[in-house]
Image (tube, rainbow, N blue to C red):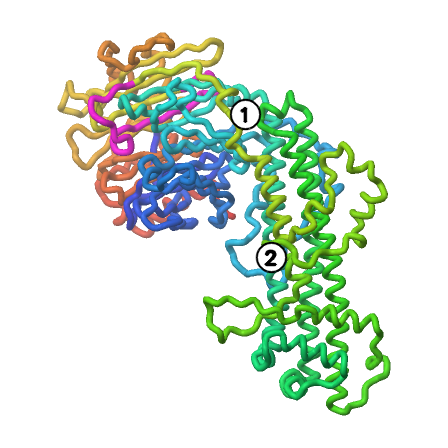
Amino acid sequence: MYNSGMRQMEERHVANQIDLMIWSHRLDLIAISNLKGEVQVHRLHWQKVWSLPPPKENTKVDSMAWRPDGKALAIGYNNGSVYVIDIEDKSVIDKYDFVQEFKDETEFKKYGISCICWALKSGTLESTTEYNIYDDSSLFLQNPPMPNTSYKTQNTNENDTEFKDSSEQFNQLNLLIVAYGTGTIFISVFGRHPYRSVHLSQFTNDPQGNYKILDIQLSDDFSIMQVLYLERCTNRIMVSIINTSVLSAYSEELSIVANSQIQIYQLLSRLTRTMKAVTEAWEHILLEMDTKMALYASTVPEGGVSADLLELLMLGVPSDDLEGFLLRDLTAKGLKKFGTSVELSYSTIQKLVLKKLNIIGQNLVYHLSELRGHAKIPDRYKILGLDEQKVTAAVRACFAFLNKCLELQQVIDVSMRNYKAFFRWLFVVIVRLLDEQTPSEIVKITQQELTHIADFLYNFDNVQVDTSESIDKPVKFNLERLGQYLQDQELTILPDNDDNPWHKILKENLCLSKDNDTIFCIDEFKKYSLIQQQNHMTKHIEEVFDIHHKDIAQNFSALFNIKCYDADAPLEVEDSFKTSQIFDVDQQRFMMALVNTKGNSQILYFMSVSVKERYSASTCQYVFSTSLLKDSSDQGENLEILDIQFYSSENLSLLLKHPSSEDSTVFVQLPLIVAIESASEFNMKCKNLIFNQYLPHTDLAPLLDPSVYKVMEKIYGQKIAVSGARKVAVVLSNIQRKVKIFEMEINSEEEDDDIFDSTSQSNITQGETSQTSDKNSTRENISF
């Protein structure tokens, strides 16, 4: 017999009204949201782990779901965004914004994120069971390090959170399913790889259909999906049974493509950070130029700095202003520090390009080439929407990006050579002006070095004027040859292709460019800056994984659309309708329970759909008479149902209103075997309502053992959250500021009868609190 013993563990009052509660099935953690839009995660004894504020003002939480491993939480907000949060430090692992698909944000707020489900497929993926040397990219690739230069912005939000996912969560296929808007279902593999979106109207044969999805449940092998939804135009609750066998049959391929995308997007994230570090290092050079040269530049006409320096280079005699600047403002010591700082910045850029951008580009080419190989197997990967032409274009764009990095590297080498010659020459000039002796090897300047100095001074003070700003703005020096690569515009000083190794290879081997989709002509991207080349590559990679062109409906098909319930008045689902679904793995059946708390709140609508051998379904309408409570005086009355949730595949938890005590609530653990045995089979192809006036109401009270319910005193409950996996339950009061947490399935001799005493939890002595803590010390301790 089922053990229904309950022990109260905590009773707490909260500052803000609680809206949603959901237990993790892997860890003793509960996530709650309040009416301010905050999300909090608490341990079993209500110790707060962290609190997350809403992303925007006046934003509330619509739905939440735990990742199957319990290490991430998906939060759906009424502004159309879904955040995947790392449980350890509440950092954002991923974010989806669905409001972009609507013309007006207010239009979206009518519907919001109505449902989030995170499903786990049974069985371990074959690709993760044994080590495969051919899948180990670490044998061929260097792991690109994160930018750690002094120029990188130190921001905790920029931590490499995408690399925190443990390999455990990829051993089994899991899907994050988000329902939003007027009935759209979005599917993401591992919560990281957007698979496809589909609108429910494609399964109901109503192109203009307007729906609100209440709950989604997948079978353990992902072959069947059961969707519970509200048809807005008819105000009818319906269930759609959808064939999703493609998710089951191609689970290995799904995981392979998803892992490839995760790795590629992680690399793109690192690329963005590295490019930011390169840009900041370059801006540091310009800042040094501004700091040292701005005072002198403000005293001469535009272009006067380079003109005076060129005159000094050609004639050997400085102007009075330039001589004063070199001796009083710059000085030999200051010039050394200036040169060292600029050299450090150049070296930083060179290292970032050589050791990071190149490595990231090589990794991208590897993973995209691997994906291209998969795309050449159409019978396995075409059904997933993998297009070989788009992957090939992305590979080609990566090659072009690598070539542009090589081109930039050559420009850096030339720039470093020129600026070293410039600073050496300027140092000699200052020493001569001071009439100091200098070694002959320093004084000697070759004709080639003179050319390098002239190159450095070319366009040295090309001022970029913004007329909208103050005329007192310092002069901006533009070292054009290198800086042009770090701007989102075409190059103005084109490189010499004769020194480019790729150009030489193509020139010597003309056959390479024939009938090869990944070989590109260097002239095609000759005018591209590095930023433009990066944007071009990112665009083609995003097109590979773009889900908007994928038609999921052609792979999914509706098996049955069942009419469940008609409401006499428009349904406010959030306030009046309580729903819950579960899939019984052992018996291979879906179970669904409904209660209309604003209508026939005394009736529990129950339906079971078996998919074991043949599709069959049974249903019944249940009530709980007051005879359930042996001491009740209101015989013949039915108890009002406040909330429901499946505790496990064996029990349904219900919260009932006490018939005589206003401050008490009845908690019931309904054995589902009783509900199923009392249900009657119906034809799933029937077009009539299954919950109608002809379906008899079965009183469950005489069929239940007294041990399946408990009367909770001193709390008028409104909501419950339960977890059979963790054997816990929480009850929320009607004022939504008081919660009671219970440990479930305890032995009768361990059950503390005093937990239902009228004494408030706040009056428990310190000694009693310590004793309770000791009794529960054997429970799992959650630590990070």
Residue 639 shows in this picture: no
The residue shown at (32%, 34%) is 720
Q: Is-magenta flag for residue 276?
A: no
- Residue matched to label 1: 122
Left or right for 761, reference 143: left
Residue 556, position as x, y percentages in the image: 49, 20
Identify residue for label 2. Answer: 487
Left or right of 262? Residue 512 is right
Q: Which residue lies furthest to the bottom in this view?
A: 435
Q: In which quarter of the image is the N terminus?
A: top left
Q: How crowded is mark 2: few (under 14 residues within 10 Å), some or many (20 or more)?
A: some
Q: Is residue 585 magenta?
A: yes
> Which region of the structure is painted magenta?
565-590
- Residue 129 location, quadrant: top right
| Residue type beneath disc 1 | Ser
- Please name the residue shown 77% across and 69% down the image: 452
User: Could you say which is closer to the camera, residue 487 or residue 339?
Assistant: 487
**Earlier sequence position, callout 2 versus callout 1:** 1
